[in-house]
Image: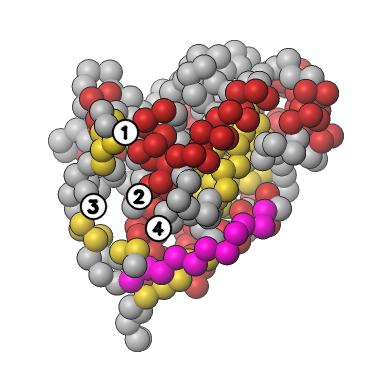
Amino acid sequence: MKEVKSFIINSALDMHLHLRDDDMLKLVGPKTSQSFAGALIMPNLAPPITTKEALLSYKKRIKEACKDDDFEAHVTIFFQVDYSYEFLKDLKDEIIAVKLYPFGVTTNSETGVSSMDVEILRPTLESMEKLGIPLCVHGETKGFVMDREKEFLPIYESLAIHFPDLKIVMEHISSKESIELLEKYDNLYATITVHHLMLTLDDVAGGMLNPHAFCKPIVKRPDDRESLLELALSAHPKVMFGSDSAPHQKNAKECHHGAAGVFTSAIALQVLTELFEKYGNLDNLNSFVSLNAQRIYGLKPIKKPIKLIKKDFEVPKSYRYKDEIVVPLFAGQTLSWSIE
Ligand code: DOR
Ligand code: ZN
């Protein structure tokens, strides 16, 4: 077999991204916009984005932070049970989706929904269904950490049944049981991260503790990783790449009570190319990182070819802007693909 020396990714899309705000946004924004044509931006700021005013001003700040690059930020609002039809109708052209966080399951989810009862969620979900606004979900319960996603599956199922015309995205799926459900309902879709394709719990806590690989949902068992890998490598039409790149200050990760979130924006395309090449699936990479999302969300991204070349890339130990320091996944390690 001929060795592949370069590969073009066209208009890469990251369908699950945390860009934060202020100096952190200025640090991580350009790390995404240098290689991606667009991204779905999560609304879990503190306080979360729940008004049109906050949404539009956040969008403006993102644009300023990424000003040197062609990059489209597709923004979202934070699910509330009392959004009216009129409110959502007015926002429809500004947002790509609404993101639902159950109360307290991850970073800045203290104002998330306290009950996943369908009847409580119905008013907002019915309006979204009528307006054609997709729902993105952080699907975890507050149960035992390894079982939280699995325990949430009946809730996904009930949402899929009660709202058949609502597009529901199971965000950052991490367990093999989620895949069965994804296949079962036409209106379920999923995103998969780089870290859930690359890591298992052993990489977080099997040897020395690695806080930079700690995230929600936690990375799981080898067979979960293998099932996710199979899904991504085949570019299953219902899955999209969503990095869930979630930067936290170095100090907030390397401490007692360390924050959950893995920063991968700057390494994602290199790692994915290495992975898809290793398994002989490079032909499917453009579908996984762009075409599937274009179809599922009806996007027409700007033309942005990114050339990856087979050349060592040493992942920086950290990235810095003013007082903000973030440590990427695989810091200090060498990847075999670089962005030209
Ligand atoms: O690990 C995570 N970090 N998972 C999430 O769902 C949120 C994210 C964050 O915002 O830090
Ligand atoms: Zn996230």
Q: Position of residue 290 (x, y in %)?
A: 56, 59
Judge left or right: residue 222 versus residue 149: left
Residue plotted at (67% across, 36% down): 95
Mark 4 or mark 3: name the one nearer the start of the chain: 4
Mark 4 near mark 3, Cβ–Cβ under 8 Å? no
Q: Which mark is residue 266?
A: 2
Q: Amino acid at mark 1?
A: Phe
Cα distance between the residues tagged 2 and 3: 9 Å
Q: Check mark 1 vs ligand 1: CB closer than 8 Å? yes or no.
A: yes
Residue plotted at (60% across, 42% down): 74
| Viewer-closest of 238 and 20 | 20
Q: Classify mark 4: residues with Cα within 10 Å, few (<14), some (14-19) or many (20+).
A: many
Residue 306 in magenta stretch: yes
Residue stretch rendered in magenta on the structure: 299-309
Q: Which mark is residue 315?
A: 3
* Res. 255 in view: yes
Q: Amino acid at mark 2?
A: Ala
Q: Position of residue 154 (x, y in %)?
A: 63, 30
Q: Position of residue 171 (x, y in %)?
A: 54, 39
Q: Classify mark 1: residues with Cα within 10 Å, few (<14), some (14-19) or many (20+).
A: many
Mark 2 or mark 3: name the one nearer the start of the chain: 2
Residue plotted at (49% across, 24% down): 45
Mark 3 or mark 1: name the one nearer the start of the chain: 1
